[in-house]
Amino acid sequence: MSAVAYKWFTFVVLVLGGGTIFKLSSLKDAFYVPMQEFMGLSNTQIGMALSVYGLVQTIGNFASIYLADRFSKRKMISISLVGIGLTGIYISTFPGYMGILISWALLSFWGEIVYWPVLLKAVRLLGTSEEQGRLFGFLEAGRGIVDTIVAFTALAIFVGLGETAFALRGSILFYSGIVIAVGIVSYFLVEDDKVSQEVLEGKVSQSKVAFDGMLKAIKMPEIWVVSFMIFSVYSVYCGLTYFIPFLKDIYGLPVALVGAYGIINQYGLKMVGGPVGGFLVDKKFHSPIRYTRVALIIAIIYMVIFMMLPHKNFNVYLGMVLTLGYGAIIFTMRAVFFANVDEIDVPRDISGAAMSIACILGYAPQLFCFALYGYLLDSYPGFTGYQFVFSCMIGFSILGVIISTVLLRMVKRRKAMVQ
């Protein structure tokens, strides 16, 4: 097998892992009611499990700054996938409430702390600087495809087995089995990290190399600026969730169309936005930072015009098209925002630490954005509440434009110093 073919075959394996590892932690997406009926969980208990997941993720990502470069990505990826699968097998026994809390804590540990930063590191190391947009874009699109196929297959298993407690166990075991299988395949196809000559000769330990790399990443200001740029984009992305109630409340979106819109909004745009964003970054802008700035400016203009439109005079299908159009812009940025790490010339041996820092700050909006947007809608009923939400999204977009402008200047200054 040629080097190019091997690279893309490895990439497919990474996509399979990225598209399956979070299905168990997102079990509620397809099986919320069955979880209540057959596992005896209340709304509060399911919510608490998700809160535990988020808490472990937030605290644990600080540890991943060190862990992501301390151990081989081949071992980290395969072990975490198998760990997720084994946790899923335990969940299929329908443990008590405490067992559920422990399970979701483990799902967060394996998926968010051990796996995700290392996956991003592995994807970055697969290609050159000229390929980063396409790699991360196709990663997002591929995950969307795998996510959709696996979710619908699990749902088919549940229906085919009679929608009983046994059927739910079957679906959970399917999720568990497929992620374990991908973990085993990953062990044989994902390469080990390259170890420095000093480590090979015993002059320094791998632990010290990882610790020094962590400190190096923490002291690199460009990594933090990139993380805040991701933060701004993700804050806007969180707002896309509220297009569903917006269409329902303002346009009278029929219940029959809610599910279809949700699938297009989450899976369809991901599959389209990834390749489009990657192509634009690599072939047109030759810079993920520059593309992000332009896309954010377009998003600002789009949303300002959108807020001024006479929505009550439009039919629901036009409303769907308008909101999906805005979502498509955001998804092109979301697909490639980790490609920015390469543009700031982060040394490849600290890629894991850099990605971990980006995850800590970049995903931080999920800790407060949903609560903020929900509060605004509850406090200001009707179109006024949505105007406040959309205004916040514009504000985060403006913040992103400012940060990306600062970052471009930092990159230009760094290149000038090198020359």
Image (tube, rainbow, N blue to C red):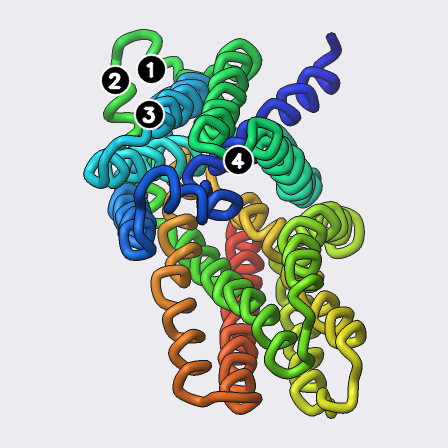
Residue 250, given in percent of the width and then of the height, sits at: 64, 83
Residue at 46% across, 23% down: 173
* Mark 2 lies on residue: 204
Q: Which quadrant holds residue 109?
A: top left
Residue 93, given in percent of the width and then of the height, sits at: 33, 25
Residue at 65% across, 40% down: 148
For mark 1, does the 10 Å Cα neighbourhood hold few (<14), some (14 to 19), or many (20 or more) residues? few
Mark number for residue 163? Answer: 4
C-alpha gap between disc 2 and disc 3: 46 Å
- Asked if residue 207 lies left or right of residue 16, the reply is left
Task: Check disc 2 and give the amino acid type.
Answer: Val
- Asked if residue 396 lies left or right of residue 98, the reply is right
Mark number for residue 198? Answer: 1
Task: Check disc 1 and give the amino acid type.
Answer: Glu
Residue at 48% across, 88% down: 381
- Given residues 331 and 22, the one toward you in this image is 22
